[in-house]
Every structure is written in C-alpha cells, then in structure tokens.
Image: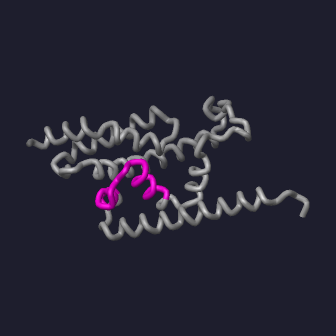
C-alpha cells in the first residue's frame, strides 16, 4: 500500500477519534477543535511516510503537541485582550449556572482537576480514548514500562483523591452542628 493510501485509510478510520480527543481538551471551542484537527492531519500528511501500522496513538501524540501550541496561543490572545480591554470579546457577558446546579458525575471532574496535568492526561488517554499501555507509550513518546508506571501512579493518586473526597463528604454529613 502506498503512503498516500495509508494516510487516506488513517484519515477515514481515525478522523472522528482524533476530533473527540481534541474536543474533550478544548471544551466548548468548536472552531478551535476544527483547526487543531486540521493541523494534526496536515502534519500526518507531511509525515505520511512515518505513519505506523497502527496510527491512532501516533495521531494522538501529534494532537497533544498541536493542542499545546493552541493553548499557548489562546493564552497569549487572552492576555492581549486583557491588556487592551476595549475588544468586544473582553466585555462579553457570560451566563453562569446557579451554584446549586451540578452536572451528573461532576465530582469525578472535580477530583480529576486536583491531580497534576500529567496524571490527568494519562488517565484520560486510557479512560476516554481507551488506549492500551502500549498505545499510551506511543502517544506519550516513552517506553511501555514507563507508561505503565505513569498509569499506575496516576491511578493511585486518583484513588487517594477519591478517598479524601469521600472522607470530607462523610465528615460534613455526620456534622450536625450541635458540636
């Protein structure tokens, strides 16, 4: 199979997986998602001779790098808007949910947010993207044993945060204020 055919197959087979991967990391920014996914496949096209037989983990690795560039760019853009202060986006009104509104499962996101960015990424890659340890290693650009250790440690820290959260909730539930 030619490299062009390999790229076409990878594009058809993995476009939506890469789109979901990027969308979950750029919450609510559809135009940015499209740009990042386009950049991922543009890079894949330029490097099509390097596409592995199982390209999805490799594409996730490229997407992680593209996302990092996009996040840096968005940060620069926000800082610029803050400095000039006259742009309509800087004065846009936002609707905020009521404090008692809670999305189902939001506690999981709260617990996950207390972990390091590296732990969050390893857990998301294995849970959301359903990567194996071997695929995780390719995506992270490290060896299999290092990927397995990172995953083990991230899961251990997640479990500790969940236990800490449960303990805090139980203490609050048991505190009737009559002390």
From the viewer's perspective, tell me whether residue 128 is left or right of residue 160: left
Residue stretch rendered in magenta on the structure: 120-139
Quadrant placement of the N terminus: top left
Q: Position of residue 162 (x, y in %)?
A: 59, 60
Q: Is residue 113 above or below residue 96?
A: below
Report the front residue among 113 and 178. 178
Is 134 part of what is drawn in magenta?
yes
Q: Position of residue 118 (x, y in %)?
A: 47, 61
Quadrant placement of the C terminus: bottom right
Numbered circles on residues, count: 0
Residue shown at the point (35%, 42%) measured from the top left: 18
Q: Position of residue 142 (x, y in %)?
A: 32, 65
Looking at this rendering, what residue extends furthest in the left direction?
1
Image quadrant assignment for residue 140: bottom left
Q: Main secondary structure of the magenta part?
A: helix
Image quadrant assignment for residue 159: bottom right
Residue shown at the point (34%, 58%) measured from the top left: 136
Report the front residue among 163 and 116. 163
Q: Is residue 116 above or below residue 80?
A: below
The type of colouring in the image is one colour
Residue shown at the point (60%, 46%) measured from the top left: 106
């Amino acid at each position: 199979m030619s490299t062009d055919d390999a790229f076409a197959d990878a594009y058809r087979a993995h476009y939506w997986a890469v789109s979901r991967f990027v969308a979950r990391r750029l919450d609510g920014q559809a135009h940015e998602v499209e740009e990042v996914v386009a950049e991922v496949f543009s890079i894949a096209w330029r490097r099509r001779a390097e596409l592995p037989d199982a390209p999805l983990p490799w594409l996730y690795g490229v997407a992680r790098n593209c996302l990092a560039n996009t996040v840096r760019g968005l940060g620069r853009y926000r800082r610029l808007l803050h400095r000039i202060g006259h742009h309509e986006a800087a004065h846009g009104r936002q609707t905020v949910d009521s404090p008692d509104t809670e999305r189902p499962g939001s506690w999981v996101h709260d617990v996950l947010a207390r972990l390091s960015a590296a732990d969050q990424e390893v857990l998301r890659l294995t849970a959301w993207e359903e990567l194996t340890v071997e695929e995780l290693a390719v995506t992270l650009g490290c060896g299999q044993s290092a990927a397995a250790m990172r995953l083990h440690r991230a899961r251990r820290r997640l479990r500790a945060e969940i236990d800490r959260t449960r303990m805090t909730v139980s203490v609050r539930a048991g505190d009737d204020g009559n002390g």
